[in-house]
Image (spheres, helix red, strand yellow):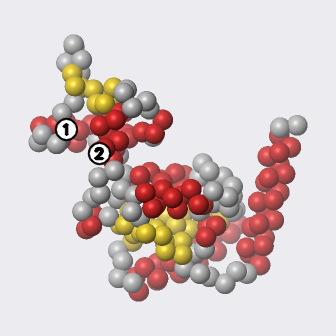
Amino acid sequence: MLLSYPLDMLLTVEDTAKILGVSKSTMRRWEAEGRQKPERTPDGHRRYRSEELMQMTVHPLPQTDRVTLAYVRVSSHDQKADLARQAMVLSEFCTKNGWTHEVIRDCGSGMNYHKKGLRALLQRIMRNDVERLVITHRDRLLRFGGELVFAICEEFQTEVVIVKQSEDTRYEDELTQDVWEIIRTISKFR
């Protein structure tokens, strides 16, 4: 992630392409088109300044290129039916509003910050290709820390739409699982 590099660091084509989510050949094509001007090492290798990449990643894409992402999550694999229900509810909501959308599905605790889908969601938001994020309820992203995700969305002009669902016992079950996970995590430090 670009935020972990110092601002004056020179990055390789491979690292730069990974940060921007494009291929190395795209980087070379952009140079040929004049969209980027990398520096060259004495051996002729391309290097990109991390501070210039930061500017590249925050330019908004044209509205037509930004997508709506619906994010659904359950705590465990035995809740697959609930995951499918969430995906269906959000897909219907997006379709009803005329939004072309994709659904990102995640399985894991609301306290797990390393879920594959959550990380992919954040990367796409920070690449500025997400017009809006649609979730069923506020803590669907993370049990604690969702406000940080919402702040990132605000920074990248990504609208957050929360489809308010009535909370049922599944919410309580999930909260119980999260409490047990907190206890297990704390007990590891003893």
Q: Which residue is denoted by mark 2 in the rendering?
A: 56
Say above or below: 100 vs 112.
below
Any part of residue 110 in sight: no
Check the image and name the residue furthest to the bottom: 96
Say above or below: 14 vs 56.
above
Residue nearer the viewer, 38 or 87: 38
Q: Where residue 67 sits in the image (x, y, percent)?
A: 35, 66
Is residue 109 toward the left or the right of residue 127 in the image?
A: right
Q: How far apart in space, not on screen, are marks 1 and 2 (Cα)? A: 9 Å
Say above or below: 42 vs 123.
above
Is residue 94 toward the left or the right of residue 138 in the image?
A: left
Q: Is mark 1 on a helix, strand or loop?
A: loop
Quadrant in which residue 72 is drawn? bottom right
Instruction: Specify few, some or many for label 1: CA neighbours under 10 Å numbering under 14, 14-19, or 20 or more.
Output: some
Q: Where residue 7 sits in the image (x, y, percent)?
A: 39, 32
Q: Quadrant of the C terminus?
A: top right
What residue is rendered at 41% in x and 52% in y? 126
Disc count in the image?
A: 2
What residue is rendered at 56% in x and 56% in y? 148
Earlier residue among tags 1 and 2? 1
Q: Which residue is denoted by mark 1 in the rendering?
A: 36
Q: In which quarter of the image is the N terminus?
A: top left
